[in-house]
Amino acid sequence: MTVVDETVRSRLIEPLATLVPAAELQGRIARLQAGLAALGLDAALLQQNADLYYYAGTVQQSYLYVPVEGDPTLFVRKVPERARAESALGAAVELTSPKALAEAIGERYGALPARLGLEFDVLPVAHFRRLEKLFPEAAFEDVGRTVVRQRAVKSAWEVERIRAAAVMADEVSALLPDLLEEGLTEVEFAGRVEAEARRLGHEGYIRMRGFNQEMFYGQLLTGVSGCVSSYLDTPLAGIGLSPSVAQGASFRRIGRGEPVVFDFVPVRDGYMADFTRMYSLGPLDEGLLRAHDAALRVQEAATAAARPGAACRAVWDAAREAAAEAGLAAHFMGHGSGQVPYVGHGIGIELDELPVLTGSGLELEPGMLFALEPKFVLPGAGAVGIENTWVVTVDGVERLTLAPDVVTVVG
């Protein structure tokens, strides 16, 4: 067991931060080891930051070695002192060079693994080639799917972290009416909102597992900006400030009678919620209001279908049916080539976790969390919608983001 001096801990860790408890890490490691045994693997070697945080409670540059039986070890390249302060895992060993990894594992465990699990879904090829040289006798297998599937079901401790993030969403949304002014550019308005989020403790970084999927705080889009789709796997993207980003707020000025979409991803202690509310300077067009009402009906239908044992496709089908009944199927979750084939997604340490509410047979389980985001894009007018974060319970779903589902008219 690694013992960390409290003066070192206080110097390296924000006093208000919530560290991942040892019991959480131990339970996660045990479930991963059960998964390794089911796959016939000798060990897993994890490197990606989200997975390191989940299983070790730190993102210091490390290799987390988890044998199928016995205690895991965090081999830390940079920075060992901080990794020991942040992680309750119990074994953080300094690694002088990545080239010394195999030797360090052999010395600590007495042998090298014959079948080693890696995160194939996120591991760069160059890193994989390096491991091939370090473990020339090993057969490598994918453990990424096992990790992602395990992380889909949250513990009570994780639900409380996401609940805290949801409170931030509610708090920031209540401040928006005082921040919104006619004539502001989208990016000026976004800057005001982001400053309040940071003041309340937003960590400022949104992790996504998907390749080339990136996001900054979320999207704050107005008027026809909400109709602009892009590469991101979301129904709304926006123009952005340049093609290098191609999403988000622009220098477009906010006008009266336009829909203002506040799609926000609050992050606290590494965990996220997801949230969308609508605002406007003066009343919105009746067509936009009808579409917003349709989004609320989709939310009602989808959450009624979301029960333990229900397949994701049942929720997706219920959502599409409600959108079609409103006569808005062609505008649901985007428009034209910008439409996306889902109505919600899992959320936790990353924004794109399981379950994805699409045509999948994956069944919902108690402890799964998802962001349900029925949205409509009306070309030439703008976008409207709603998004809330929900946790699956033993008999249904519980909503974590609690701000009223209304269009807030300012001025």
Image: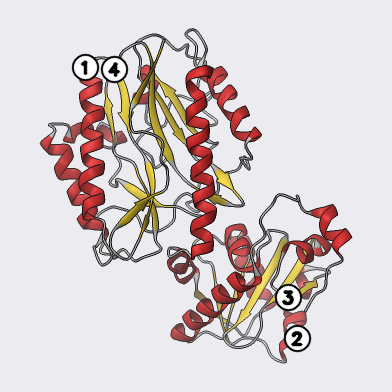
Type of the residue with mark 4: Ala
Tell me, yes or no, if residue 349 can be seen here.
Answer: no
For this view, does 195 lie left or right of residue 240? right
Q: Residue at x 24, y 62 (%)?
A: 311
The x and y percentages for residue 147 are 49, 68
Residue 202 pos. (x, y %): 61, 40
Q: CA distance from mark 1 to mark 2?
A: 68 Å
Distance, label 4 to label 1, CA atoms, is 11 Å
Q: Quadrant of residue 277?
A: top left
Q: Is residue 302 above or below residue 283?
A: below
Say whether disc 1 or disc 3 marks the residue closer to the N-terminus. 3
**Residue of label 1:** 286
Task: Using the image, determine if residue 16 lies above or below residue 335.
Answer: below
| Residue that sits furthest to the bottom in the current view | 110
Label 3, on which residue?
90
Q: For residue 286, which quarter of the picture?
A: top left
Q: Is residue 398 left or right of residue 80?
A: left
Single out the mark in the foreground, 3 or 4. Answer: 3
Q: Earlier in the sequence, mark 4 or mark 2?
A: 2
Q: Secondary structure at mark 2?
A: helix
Tell me, yes or no, whether the two marked residues, 4 and 1, touch with CB atoms within 8 Å.
Answer: no
Name which residue type carries label 1: Glu
Residue nearest the viewer, comparing 248 with 392: 392
**What is the C-alpha distance between the residues marked 4 and 2?**
63 Å
Tag 1 or tag 4, which sits nearer the N-term?
Answer: 1
Element under disc 4? loop
**Label of residue 381 in the image:** 4
Q: CA distance from mark 2 to mark 3?
A: 14 Å
Marks 3/4: CA distance?
A: 56 Å
Who's the residue at 72% across and 60% down the image?
61
